[in-house]
Image: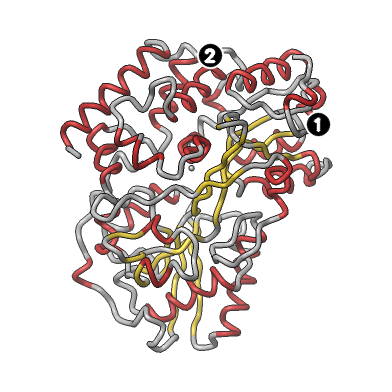
Amino acid sequence: MRLRNHLRGGAVVAAVALTVSACSAQAGGGDTSGEGEVAGEITVITQRTDIVDTVFQEYKAEFEAEYPDVTVNFEAITDYEGEIAVRMNTDDYGDVLLIPNSVQPDQFATFFEPLGSVEEMGQEYRLVEEKAYDGQVYGLSITVNTQGLVYNKKVWEEAGITDLPATPDEFLDDLRAISQNTDAVPYYTNYADGWPLSQWDGNRGAMGDPAYQNTHVAHSDTPWAEDEWHGISDGLLYDVVAEGLSEEDPTTTNWEESKTLLGTGQVATMLLGSWAITQMRQAAEDAGGSAEDIGYMPFPYQVDGTFHAQVAGDYKNAINVNSEHKAAARAWIDWFAKESGYAHDEGGISPLLDGPMPETLGDFEAAGVEYVELEPAPQGKESYEADVVAAAEIDLYGNIYRQQLVDVARGAGGGDKESFFADLNQRWADARASVGE
């Protein structure tokens, strides 16, 4: 599948700020500069429940061989965002953890050790600004993702589609073709698990403007207008559901099952970060299919005839400010980024500036996709968008309002597309007025 004009077929939670007691005054011991004693027993908290007993045990063995005075223990949490927020009301949230999305930039120093200045860390690592505040970096990406749609190539081809959709309307045409010509569910929302719906916000780079979030979104009174990102992306999600091109009963969706559904062609398409490619390919093989059946396409939107895809960090490893073994925790974070191979094995882009691009993004290379790293907010404005999100009580980075959107679109909630977006715009404008520029 390459260019549409060749072969057209027949048819990236913050609304609720973390409400925790400030415990930074109880900071533990150790030295995160790398000059302290790298020793002790550390607990690393992860969301990877699926590989904590396999791949992560290999990481442990390799790390402990290099640092024999350190013992690494893992704790995997299924509902990471929900459970870790509760844990962070105490000092007991591991030595290394992933920075939850609900922690706002001005709270970083309360919970996490600074790792170095943006200028210093930026000479070696990608996207350090994403979890920085007041010039200090508080987390390093476990991997770097781009954004798009994972799809079953065989199903799309069976529907007679052999080129990439370049607009939301073309994408809808393609899903209609899949509905008419195959037995597959054209699009799967993963509504019940919720978090996959948050992935829709991670595609802002499709607008092709690195400065977009510093000129639009929190700097607009109408981010759900037809020509602004959230109007375009959420509008497409609404139309997909409203036309019956998604699963019949979204309340019964299941994330783990969805991998097999896509791998076997029972589902055609899902919007997910590039991290999902390897998982879907593995699911296809486990179900007796081929990894080659799984493709990855950019969001259906072009600027001057070119697809753009946002590049952004995944979860960030950080050090608990209360850890008693900060030097060991810091050694783990650096080792994980440089030597574990996690990003490569997961099909992600390396968090290192000089790291390789993964072969899993070969489809993007063939489509001529240009990658976009969004510019960070200016210093002193790092919390502005999060402040507007909180004041509007719209979980822009989460799933609640998009679940409501799906409900309205499928007739299970009151209103329609126009009224739903008008309400979002009004609440957003009111929040901007209350926060100020």
SS at circle 2: helix
In the rendered image, the vertical position of residue 323 relative to residue 350, given as above or below: below
Residue 154 is labelled as: 1
- Badge 2 vs badge 1, beta-carbon distance below 8 Å: no
- Is 317 situated left or right of 434 in this image? right
**Local crowd size for mark 1, using a 10 Å CA cut-off: few (<14), some (14–19), many (≥20):** some
How many marks do you count on the picture? 2
Residue wearing tag 2: 242
Which of the two residues, 357 or 189, is positioned nearer the viewer here? Answer: 357
Chain-order first, disc 2 or disc 1: 1
Where does the image place residue 138, in percent across and percent down from the top left?
36, 64
The residue shown at (74%, 40%) is 294
Residue drawn where x is 54% and y is 70% of the image:
336
Distance (Cα) linking label 2 and label 1 = 25 Å
Q: Is residue 67 visible?
A: yes
Q: Quadrant of residue 37?
A: bottom left
Q: Secondary structure at mark 1?
A: helix
On the image, the x and y values in percent for residue 92 come to 33, 65
Position above or below: 17 against 142: above
Amino acid under disc 1 = Lys
Above-or-below relation of 120 to 109: below
